Amino acid sequence: MLRLAALRDEPNAFGSMVGAAEKRSATEWRQQVKEIATYVVVIDGIDVGLARGAPDEAHPNNAFLISMWASPDARKQGVGEQLIRAIVNWAQATGFKRLLLDVADENTSAVALYERMNFQPTGETGTLPPPRTHIREHRRVMYL
């Protein structure tokens, strides 16, 4: 499963941890796909990238890009840009005004991609959930 591959490959890039995700049932995974906008990039019949978007329950004009990943073999091939465009299109079609994301400061390639795609820093910072509170994140926004 693509989400598990992402969590294994980049464990410090996501709030979720692979151990907890592995315990989810097939029913739980299907429910997530129904509730969370999910996009996959396929190259030569192989799933190589995943992005998910969700509404911000506290602020109805906002949506979040909650997870994005491209397999190591597919990086530097425009997969990230395709995934971001899919989430932006979903957010615009759904009527959101802002698309937000949180990215680890140490994930310099993701930070550079988000800058290229016009996500601007908001000045808000935080950390990943325990036990990874040592990983600092910052929030970025794209106005739609």
Image (cartoon, grey):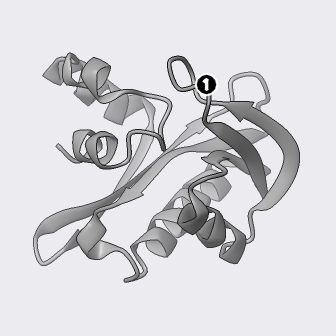
Vertical arrangement, residue 38 with respect to residue 107, above or below? above
Q: State left or right for residue 121 relative to residue 26.
A: right
> Within the image, what quadrant is residue 143 found in?
bottom right
Q: Where is residue 44 in the image (x, y as percent from the top left)?
A: 12, 78
From the image, which quarter does the C terminus lie in? bottom right
Q: Position of residue 42 (x, y in %)?
A: 22, 69
Nearer to me, 70 or 93: 70
Q: Where is residue 29 in the image (x, y as percent from the top left)?
A: 25, 27
Q: State left or right for residue 112 relative to residue 13.
A: right
Nearer to me, 44 or 6: 6
Residue positioned 56% across, 62% down in the render: 110
> Within the image, what quadrant is residue 46 found in?
bottom left
Identify which amino acid the numbered label 1 is placed on.
Thr
Q: Residues within 10 Å of mark 1 (few under 14, many from 20)?
A: few
Residue 137 visible in the current orientation: yes
Which residue in the rendered view is the most extreme toward the bottom? Answer: 77
Mark 1 lies on a secondary structure that is loop
Vertical arrangement, residue 132 with respect to residue 55, above or below? above
Nearer to me, 94 or 83: 83
Q: Give the labeled residue for mark 1.
A: 133
From the image, which quarter does the N terminus lie in? top left
Residue 144 visible in the current orientation: no
Which residue in the rendered view is the most extreme toward the front? Answer: 134
Residue positioned 50% across, 30% down in the render: 15
Vertical arrangement, residue 33 with respect to residue 94, above or below? above
Q: State left or right for residue 97 relative to residue 33.
A: right
Which residue in the rendered view is the most extreme toward the right? Answer: 123
Q: Where is residue 101 in the image (x, y as percent from the top left)?
A: 66, 47
Q: How many labels does the image show?
A: 1
Q: State left or right for residue 18 relative to residue 38.
A: left
